[in-house]
């Protein structure tokens, strides 16, 4: 038995998870670290997806009447179970998604943090009293659960995305149906297993408190996703992944007047001005560009550097790129793990070939560490000096590619280059100039959902907007009003007078 298989068995034992019920031949889970097959699982059919949605809808009809703080208690307990199993679930993320150990553990910590956040929100789902022009009337805004929330997640954050959506959807009174990435079914099965443990323990204390079918998992491909997206019983679909996927989901959901919450691929940029702290910038650039092997939605893809500091900064980056520790994500000291699979490697090579054709000078980008497995796809991060912004820099590639262009003018020129792509998720500027920083964050500055100063393109900070604009979707947020995306707004007017005055001075005497 391979080391990955052995580690998997240890993790499953720690989680108390038996995969027997999920075994099949439809989908293969591989360990990117060595290419080992971890497990093969069966797929749900479209008809099974419909049945799961029906079951979730019935659960919603009961759950919506449960007081929100009680719903919050379920999520609080989920957070506690995640704390207990953080080490095991974090290792499973590393095994199946290829993240280095600290990033796997960090993703589970993000799950825990969002549970805490959602529990607090469960006591803040409130509306407003609205001023009415009619005497003897009270008008108010109220918020109500939506129904079933469909969750579609990507391989690069195989568990955190589910937790974001599940925690908020549940405290808002909705049921959830989750279709994870085909590349990471085991982490999804583990999350559903832990959720079921929480539900069972809750119901043991208070029989029937949690309706059956409240949290559902669908393993499958395009047909299963399409069933989720097309169902009128799923008023909200939250999807994370590529722009290509989001464009299809958004259109289909809009056709039936549903609500989509989209957080799509990034292609993010950073500006380095003449006044920047270059050592600080170099550290931020490296983490943002090569962490998770450049496969995050917030990965740095474009570096826009003032010509006066470009040579100094690039010399520092070239030294880092040549020496950075690439290897087994579960080994101590590793900073860059593998790409998810060969398709990701091939996509990277195609992008680099296009960059060369467009005048780019490529440093790195080659396959390395083939000793770790024939089906393990490790690469040296690529630093690509471009003569100017070109077509390849407008497209998303989930791989450690950093395109570098220089500018000669003022910060407005750099901002224009940054904004001149279809995506608008995350951005950053390194500067010691207050005016440059403020301009970058102003209405005339970065057009991204995240605009950072002297920090990289980091994204999912609890309390802030997250989702981006333009082709990155403009959807999912993690701020204090995020719950509104999972609820419907209603206006109620109460007449406590004995008269019936009409608005806008209308008279209608009968």
Image (tube, grey):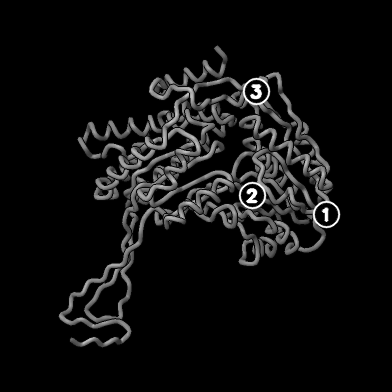
Query: x%, y% of residue 330?
Result: 59, 24
Sequence-wise, the earlier of marks 2 and 3 is 3
SS type, badge 3: loop
**Circle 3 crowding by C-alpha within 10 Å: few under 14, some 14–19, many from 20:** some
Image quarter of the N terminus: top right
Dot 2 corresponds to which residue?
455
Indicate which disc residue 375 carries.
3
Residue 475 in sight: yes
Of badges 2 and 1, nearer the viewer stands 1
Name which residue lies at 80% across and 62% down.
409
Residue matched to label 1 = 307
Q: Residue at x 21, y 37 (%)?
A: 208
Q: Residue 138 location in percent, x, y?
A: 25, 73
Secondary structure of the residue carrying numbered label 2: loop
Front-most of 453 and 99? Answer: 99
State the residue at coordinates (50%, 40%). 153
Residue 106 position (above or below residue 428): above
């Amino acid at each position: 038995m391979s080391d990955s298989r052995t580690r998997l068995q240890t993790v499953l034992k720690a989680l108390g998870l038996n995969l027997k019920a999920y075994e099949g031949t439809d989908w293969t889970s591989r360990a990117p670290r060595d290419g080992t097959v971890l497990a093969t699982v069966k797929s749900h059919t479209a008809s099974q997806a419909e049945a799961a949605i029906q079951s979730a809808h019935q659960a919603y009809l009961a759950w919506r009447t449960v007081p929100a703080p009680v719903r919050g208690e379920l999520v609080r307990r989920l957070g506690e179970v995640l704390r207990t199993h953080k080490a095991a679930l974090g290792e499973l993320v590393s095994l199946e998604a290829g993240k280095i150990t600290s990033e796997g553990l960090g993703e589970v910590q993000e799950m825990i943090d969002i549970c805490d956040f959602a529990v607090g929100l469960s006591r803040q789902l409130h509306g407003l009293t609205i001023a009415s022009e009619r005497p003897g009337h009270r008008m108010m805004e109220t918020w109500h659960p939506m129904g079933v929330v469909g969750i579609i997640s990507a391989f690069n954050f195989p568990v955190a995305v589910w937790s974001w959506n599940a925690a908020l959807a549940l405290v808002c009174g909705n049921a959830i149906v989750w279709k994870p990435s085909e590349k990471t079914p085991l982490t999804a099965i583990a999350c559903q297993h832990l959720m079921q443990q929480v539900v069972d323990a809750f119901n043991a204390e208070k029989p029937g408190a949690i309706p059956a079918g409240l949290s559902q998992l669908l393993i499958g491909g395009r047909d299963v996703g399409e069933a989720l997206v097309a169902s009128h019983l799923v008023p909200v679909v939250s999807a994370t992944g590529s722009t290509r996927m989001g464009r299809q989901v958004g259109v289909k959901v809009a056709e039936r007047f549903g609500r989509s919450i989209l957080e799509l691929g990034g292609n993010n940029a950073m500006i380095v001005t003449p006044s920047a702290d270059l050592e600080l910038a170099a550290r931020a650039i490296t983490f943002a560009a090569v962490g998770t092997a450049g496969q995050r939605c917030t990965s740095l893809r474009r570096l826009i550097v003032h010509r006066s500091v470009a040579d100094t900064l690039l010399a520092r980056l070239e030294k880092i790129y040549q020496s950075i520790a690439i290897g087994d994500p579960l080994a101590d000291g590793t900073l860059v793990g593998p790409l998810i699979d060969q398709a990701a490697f091939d996509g990277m090579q195609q992008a680099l070939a296009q960059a060369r054709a467009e005048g780019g000078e490529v440093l790195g980008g080659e396959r390395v560490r083939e000793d770790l497995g024939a089906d393990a796809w490790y690469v040296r991060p690529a630093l690509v000096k471009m003569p100017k912004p070109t077509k390849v820099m407008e497209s998303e590639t989930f791989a450690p590619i950093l395109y570098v262009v220089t500018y000669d003018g003022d910060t407005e020129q750099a901002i224009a280059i940054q904004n001149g792509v279809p995506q608008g998720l995350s951005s950053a500027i390194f500067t010691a100039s207050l005016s440059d920083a403020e301009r970058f964050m102003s209405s005339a500055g970065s057009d991204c959902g995240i605009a950072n100063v002297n920090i990289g393109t980091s994204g999912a900070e609890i309390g802030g907007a997250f989702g981006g604009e333009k082709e990155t979707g403009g959807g999912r947020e993690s701020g204090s009003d995020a719950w509104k995306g999972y609820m419907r707004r209603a206006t109620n007017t109460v007449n406590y007078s004995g008269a019936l005055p009409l608005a806008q001075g209308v008279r209608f005497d009968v």
